[in-house]
């Protein structure tokens, strides 16, 4: 008895992904919130709307290394590039 291939029931098989919208903003502000344990950087436009943000924790630093100046610099670079 010949085998029949299984039927696909979930759509056409293509995945739909959303594209990341890039906005060209000529001027912006960096808001820095530095605590004893972490540093959070928010990049905003001139109206104050947050465009991107990063922190030492989201940049890969954990524990006491989050509170170092190097971790703050890496977080600032990450927020500026996004």
Image (cartoon, rainbow, N blue to C red):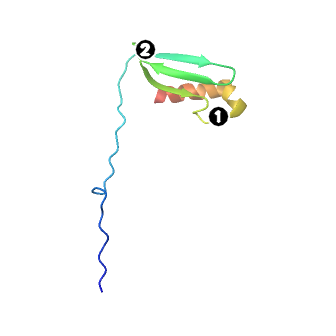
Residue 30, horizontal then vertical, whole percent: 50, 17
- Choose top left, top right, bottom left or bottom right for residue 69: top right
> Residue extending furthest bottom?
1
Q: Which residue is mark 1?
A: 61
Residue sitting at x 29%, y 83%: 2
Classed neighbour count for the residue bearing mark 2: other residues with Cα under 10 Å, few (<14), some (14–19), many (≥20):
few
Residue sitting at x 59%, y 18%: 33
Residue 42, horizontal then vertical, whole percent: 51, 21
Q: Which residue is mark 2?
A: 48
| The N terminus sits in image quarter | bottom left
Up/down of 36 relative to 56, above or below: above
2 or 71, nearer to the observer? 2
- Choose top left, top right, bottom left or bottom right for residue 64: top right
8 or 67, nearer to the observer? 8
Disc 2 secondary structure class: loop
The earlier-in-sequence mark between 2 and 1 is 2
Up/down of 15 relative to 1, above or below: above
Do callouts 2 and 1 mark residues in contact (Cβ within 8 Å)?
A: no
Residue sitting at x 52%, y 16%: 31
Disc 1 secondary structure class: loop
Apparent side of residue 44 relative to residue 36 in the rendered image (left or right): left
């Amino acid at each position: 008895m010949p085998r029949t291939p299984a039927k696909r029931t979930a759509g056409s098989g293509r995945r739909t992904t959303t594209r990341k919208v890039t906005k060209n903003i000529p001027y912006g502000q960096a808001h820095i919130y530095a605590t004893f344990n972490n540093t959070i950087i928010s990049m905003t436009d001139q109206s104050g709307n947050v465009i991107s943000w990063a922190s030492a924790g989201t940049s890969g630093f954990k524990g006491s290394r989050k509170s170092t100046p190097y971790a703050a610099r890496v977080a600032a670079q990450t927020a500026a590039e996004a």
